[in-house]
């Protein structure tokens, strides 16, 4: 789907020629590494770059670091900081390459190794991350940062009890760290220990009232309601001068939720709009990238393409892809399916997107990506290998021994043609909700990363329309390959919707799916508390309270709104 406009330049090509090529004798010892980092600490240019990074001036930091590396291509501190720039703009592969080069130059550079582990976690390559983390812990078993990151990685692969136990060890050693309490709260929330999660989040804001993520985490429980004292505390923090833009944005989202719960709709909208505007400044978005990807995919993945490749791909029917827009009811669908004895819910997996990025190669925003057209050059063996690679990569998330599993990454709609090609027997479920209701819910959700389109109402409407257009084109190329679930219909007649859903996935009816709210499992998405209750109508028409402020969204949605919920747009594609 393109780079989303994150990188203005090619991060890797910082210095001319062989800037990062290793020469004999250039591997640094521990003492040499320490000396190089001490010298870097006194470099005014790196100090300015560091300040620019902290204050969100990414382009300025990048320019300073590029100049430093032109002067000294082996400056390991500058390489590490440039990797931080790459990570900030979502170019994790670039960040990884830079950090690995820093570690080739200085294997004892523990800061770079920790950053590498973090970048691998961000790419959901948790097994690789744990290798680097264990190297850090072999050198220093008491390394709190490495243990904290290990706890996070364990949580991401579903080892929740081990993750929580490690957080509890860390808190017992030092309970004055707000971010540690916050991470602990995330783990507790995921496995349904909501009361304890609230205690953990409150401890985080008690230690540091400006901790925006903790305030937002309370709001993000959805069933939680702020007290008057909480609102006052957030307003005081918001009025402070020393608040980072990230904390300010997250407190803004939390205040929006607090005001909305009180019926103060205009003020709630203002807080949401301000918070989204801050996110937009931090994460740029280019709507044209998405339009181009949809246009190219619609033209490329036609009926003839699939007919010529009939029988290709990995035939394993295990995956069930639940895709579409965030906040469309996908977590509800996942919870229903995960209540079936043959199905395991594994959450939002990034592996399809990573395969697509690999097929895209190392391309910049101003270069045309070879994906998806590059798929035409693959042999049957290549295509099958991609499907098998996906299954191998996702195995780390499977713990129950059940034969089927759910990948609930919403953004996979952009790669539905790839999924159909490499995993032709996989089930594909498209969850859809009223366009305004869905988009308004997305706009209120604090997406720190991964959903750059969500910070502006017009961008959001355009993205939803692109998604509908892409799915319509795929339906035309592969009729019946996607089962569509309309959220409102599921709410109106749950049993009929659940029976149809199970049939589409090739699963026998099981009454446990009707009592999905009683299923005990880890849920990492914003709807974690809502799906632990029976189906409710509360949110179906909630957006109408704000309709008078949503005209940019309505205009951008166009026919995606006027056609809903009919499939006229599908028939016309």
Image (cartoon, helix red, strand yellow):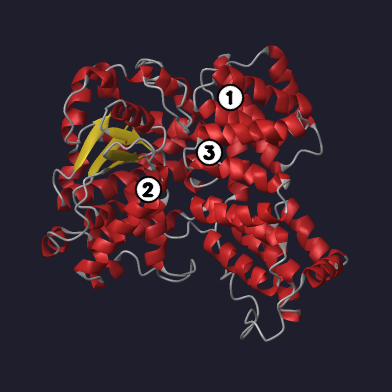
Q: Residue at x 18, y 21 (%)?
A: 496
Residue 120 at what x, y percent from top left?
A: 55, 55
Quarter occupied by residue 359: bottom left
Q: Secondary structure at mark 2?
A: helix
- Camera-side residue: 70 or 34? 34
In the picture, the disc for residue 395 is 2
The mark nearer the N terminus, 1 or 2, is: 1
State whether residue 382 is above or below residue 482. below
For label 1, count other residues whose C-alpha is less than 10 Å away and answer few (under 14), some (14-19) or many (20+).
many
Residue placed at 76% from the left, 33% from the top? 173
Disc 3 target residue: 155
Q: Left or right of 154: which side holds 543?
A: left
In the picture, measured across the screen, residue 446 lies left or right of residue 302, that is right
The crowd level at tag 2 (other Cα within 10 Å; few <14, some 14-19, many 20+) is few
CA separation in Å, label 1 and label 3: 21 Å
Pick the quarter of the image with the N terminus: bottom left
| Total marks in image | 3
Residue 328 image offset from top left, x and y in percent? 37, 32
Neighbours of disc 3 within 10 Å: few (<14), some (14-19), many (20+): many
Q: Nearer the viewer, mark 1 or mark 2?
A: 2
Q: Secondary structure at mark 3?
A: helix
């Amino acid at each position: 789907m393109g780079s989303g406009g994150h990188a203005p330049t090619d991060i890797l090509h910082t210095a001319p020629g062989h800037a990062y090529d290793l020469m004999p004798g250039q591997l640094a010892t521990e003492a040499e590494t320490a000396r190089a980092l001490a010298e870097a600490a006194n470099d005014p240019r790196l100090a300015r770059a560091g300040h620019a990074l902290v204050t969100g001036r990414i382009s300025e930091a990048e320019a300073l670091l590029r100049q430093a590396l032109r002067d000294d291509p082996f400056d390991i501190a500058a390489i590490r900081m440039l990797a931080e720039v790459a990570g900030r703009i979502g170019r994790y592969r670039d960040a990884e390459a830079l950090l690995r080069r820093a570690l080739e130059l200085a294997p004892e550079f523990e800061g770079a190794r920790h950053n590498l582990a973090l970048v691998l976690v961000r790419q959901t390559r948790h097994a690789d991350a744990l290798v680097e983390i264990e190297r850090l812990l072999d050198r220093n078993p008491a390394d709190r940062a490495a243990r904290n990151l290990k706890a996070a990685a364990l949580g991401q692969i579903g080892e929740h009890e081990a993750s929580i136990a490690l957080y509890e060890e860390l808190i017992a050693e030092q309970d004055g760290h707000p971010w540690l309490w916050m991470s602990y709260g995330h783990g507790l929330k995921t496995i349904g220990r909501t009361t304890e999660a609230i205690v953990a989040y409150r401890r985080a804001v008690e230690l540091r009232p400006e901790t925006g993520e903790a305030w937002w985490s309370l709001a993000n429980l959805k069933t939680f309601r702020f007290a008057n004292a909480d609102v006052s505390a957030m307003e005081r923090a918001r009025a402070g001068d020393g608040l980072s833009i990230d904390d300010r944005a997250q407190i803004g989202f939390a205040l929006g939720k607090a005001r909305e719960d009180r019926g103060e709709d205009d003020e709630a909208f203002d807080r949401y709009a301000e918070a989204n505007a801050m996110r937009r400044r931090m994460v740029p978005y280019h709507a044209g990238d998405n339009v181009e990807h949809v246009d190219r995919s619609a033209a490329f993945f036609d009926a003839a393409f699939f007919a010529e490749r009939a029988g290709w791909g990995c035939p394993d029917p295990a995956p069930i892809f639940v895709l579409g827009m965030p906040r469309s009811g996908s977590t509800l669908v996942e919870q229903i399916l995960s209540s079936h004895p043959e199905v395991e819910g594994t959450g939002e997996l990034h592996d399809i997107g990573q395969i697509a990025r690999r097929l895209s190669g190392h391309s910049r925003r101003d270069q045309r990506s070879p994906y998806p057209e590059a798929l035409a050059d693959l042999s049957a063996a290549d295509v099958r290998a991609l499907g098998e690679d996906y299954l191998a990569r996702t195995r780390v998330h499977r713990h129950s021994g059940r034969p089927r599993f759910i990948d609930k990454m919403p953004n996979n709609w952009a790669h539905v043609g790839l999924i159909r090609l490499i995993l032709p027997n996989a089930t594909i479920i498209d969850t859809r909700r009223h366009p305004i209701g869905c988009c308004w819910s997305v706009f209120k959700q604090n997406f720190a990363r991964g959903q750059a389109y969500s910070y502006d109402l017009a961008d959001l409407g355009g993205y939803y329309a692109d998604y509908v257009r892409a799915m319509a084109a795929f339906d035309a190329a592969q009729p019946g390959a996607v089962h569509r679930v309309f959220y409102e219909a599921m709410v109106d007649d749950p049993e009929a919707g659940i029976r149809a859903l199970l049939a589409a996935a090739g699963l026998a009816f099981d009454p446990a799916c009707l009592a999905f709210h009683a299923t005990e499992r880890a849920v990492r998405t914003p709807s974690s508390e809502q799906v632990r209750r029976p189906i409710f109508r509360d949110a179906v028409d909630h957006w109408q309270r704000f309709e008078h402020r949503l005209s940019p969204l309505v205009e951008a949605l166009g026919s995606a709104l006027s056609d809903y919920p009919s499939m006229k747009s599908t028939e016309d594609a």
